[in-house]
Amino acid sequence: MDLIVDGGSENNNKTVEQFIRESQVDITKKIALKDIQQSNSMVEASNKILKHRYLFKQPISNRKHLEEHLKDAIHDYCNQRPHYALGIYTPFEVQYDKRPTFNIKTVKNAVKERREMNKMNGCDQKCD
């Protein structure tokens, strides 16, 4: 298994090296743009979105709480929220070639739910 990392100290340290050595899986660590041509910028961008759009806005008191918030965030990001780069589709819909079926009641409900969710996330804008 290849573990693709960037050059940051969070990935290149004794703890990570020890984990790789002691793992029961054969792991080869490769540094993006050094050992391989590709960058991991798309993963970094997704992680930044998860942290800033979801996790940093929530009080997280322990690991279990973090795991609950992360599960909800990933579900929203992948299944509920259309991405600009994907047109009107979510990553799930693109990955599994699912086309949404729209009816006016569902769309109105989604708009209402999104507004309520946005209000809970501390948005400074005034939405009606």
Image: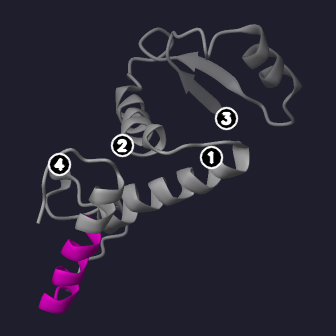
Please name the residue that numbered disc 2 is placed on. 53
**How far separated are the C-alphas under marks 2 and 1?**
14 Å
Q: What residue lies at 88% left-to-right and 25% top-to-bottom? A: 22
- Kind of residue indicated by mark 3: Met
Please name the residue that numbered disc 4 is placed on. 85
- Kind of residue indicated by mark 2: Arg
Magenta span: predominant SS is helix
If you read the primary sequence from the N terminus, does the residue marked by circle 4 or circle 3 appear first? 3
Closer to the eye: label 1 or 3? 1
Range of residues picked out in magenta: 102-114
Tag 1 and tag 3, C-beta contact below 8 Å:
no
- Kind of residue indicated by mark 4: Ala
**How far separated are the C-alphas under marks 2 and 4?**
17 Å
Please name the residue that numbered disc 3 is placed on. 1
Question: Element at badge 3?
Answer: loop
Q: What residue lies at 61% left-to-right and 16% top-to-bottom? A: 11
- In this orientation, which residue lies closer to the viewer: 122 or 26? 122
Question: Element at badge 2?
Answer: helix
Please name the residue that numbered disc 1 is placed on. 66
Q: What residue lies at 11% left-to-right and 66% top-to-bottom? A: 128
